[in-house]
Amino acid sequence: MDEAFQQVDFGPIKQFIDNDDVTDISYSNGGQVWLKTLSSGVYRVENTGIDNALMEKIAFQCANSMGKAFNMANPFLDAESAELRMNFVHDSIARNGIAVLIRKTPAKIRLEKEKILAEDYVRLDIHDFLLKCVEGHCNILVSGETGSGKTELVKYLAAHTKENEKLITIEDTLELHLDRIFPHRDIVAMKTNNIASYSDVLVTCMRQNPRWILLSEVRSAEAVMAVRNSISSGHNIISTIHADKAESIPSRLYSLLESNIDLEQFLRSIHRYVQIGVHIKGYYSTKYKRFHREITEVVEFYVTENNEPKHNLLYKKTPDGKVFINNPTKYLIDYFESQGIIIPPDILVKQQFVDPNAKKDDDVMVLNDDVKPTEIVDNQNVGQAQVVPTPTNVQSITNVQPVNNNISRTNASAEVDAILNGNNVNVLNQTSNMNANITNEQLNSNVSQIANNINKTTVAQVNSNAAMPNINNIPNS
């Protein structure tokens, strides 16, 4: 079929097919040509010389090459070559003229580390973490809208699997082309059709003993069951799905089932076997003055000891450019260990709080380990970079031991405890609104204001024997 398509006369369309920046060519409405590109997004081109007659000619040439008909009785035509996917709709159905979409699926990996870091596609720490997830054989699902670049990310991640690990791709339309990109590797490319369904191909796939199974996209109930069966049998997957955010991936899988399977049971199985969800967004960026793609979310899925499905927001970038980061839970760390990979608990956040004296990346919000990221995102003002202490951290101030043991712990420190407990809400309100660049002197000043409410005699005794230490040096009880 590929050799036959080489004989198709694409005419003026050939210039767009040969342009590596162009990913999709859309023709509709009696002569309009729209391009989707990597650099500029979607835009219309004028005076192309492309019309209904040319598109009908190309459709007939493709139909003849495939031994199919394209007419009023057969108004739809799908044509697929090694690097092109074409869809034609006859003008008996598309009443304003033949409709055509040509999608390019080149056998190359467009993403390169230096390029994606320079173009702000992903942060370096998140990039390295995702590659560590591939090394640790995590099951990964990539979500995003059409054209956001989900398949390209899957190809990039798959390129970092080990050379001696067998890969099998299962697709209904060929897009990954990993067998052509890595001809020296043990890769089997399988394609479903009207005869061989996802289930049929998956059964055969299991007998091929792969380490990785790559589904180009999960878009049907059959594909969902293929995902669940493959991961529950011990194989690793990387695939894509349409979802509005990473944390919605399990519920999106359930919605595709269209069955009466118990929701909680299904979510538990997905949260147990799918470790990582990644969300990609593509949009026109006013900052870069071009179409921009970036990873906006990375989520960890897990099931607690109480058998409850949960997620942990590891990374989030908001539309206004603010970044939220959190460390993985013990469940993901334990999974890495089961795969022979040791990762530090602070692989993403190197300390519980941002050091006010340390140099920090701009617009980065570090979340406390014992605070759920979703709660912080929902309840805090994401327009400001903040460090959010918890009641436990604030309460540790009350456990300061006086230097002079002659001062009674019951009379002095207990009274401090009572005042701090009584003003706990005020303390939290003060500290939660502090900027991440607050100095030690400012923080000590806030503590001093609270201490002024203590009996003057007691304060005089405390101040004469033990100066209030720097909060960073206060040990936890």
Image (tube, rainbow, N blue to C red):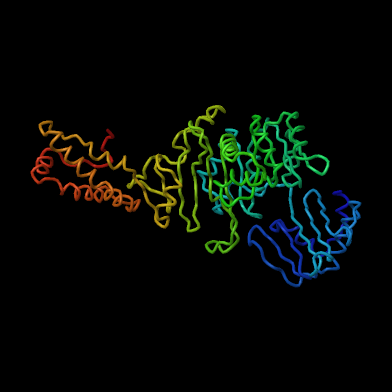
Residue 131 visible at all: no
* Whole-percent x, y for residue 437 in the image: 33, 51
* Residue 470, x across and y down, in percent: 24, 42
Q: Does 174 sit above or below residue 14?
A: above
- Given residues 180 and 326, the one toward you in this image is 326
Q: Nearer the viewer, residue 193 or 191?
A: 193
The reply to whether residue 286 is in sight is: yes
The single residue placed furthest to the front in the displayed view is 260
| Left or right: residue 325 compared with residue 419 | right
Q: Position of residue 189 (x, y in %)?
A: 76, 39
**Residue farthest bottom in this picture:** 47
Q: Residue at x 61, y 37 (%)?
A: 139
Residue 282: x and y, percent?
60, 56
Q: Quadrant of residue 24?
A: bottom right
Query: Residue at 83% of width from left, 57% of height from top?
Result: 76
Q: Observer-nearest residue: 243 or 327?
A: 243
> Along the horizontal axis of the image, is 158 left or right of 172?
left
* In the rendered image, the vertical position of residue 39 relative to residue 257, given as above or below: below
Which of the image's four quarters has the C terminus? top left
Count of number-bearing discs: 0
**Which residue lies at the image location 67% right of the left edge and 34% below the top edge?**
229
Can you tell which quarter of the image residue 190 is in? Answer: top right
Is residue 352 found left or right of 315 in the rendered image? left
Q: Residue furthest left?
A: 457
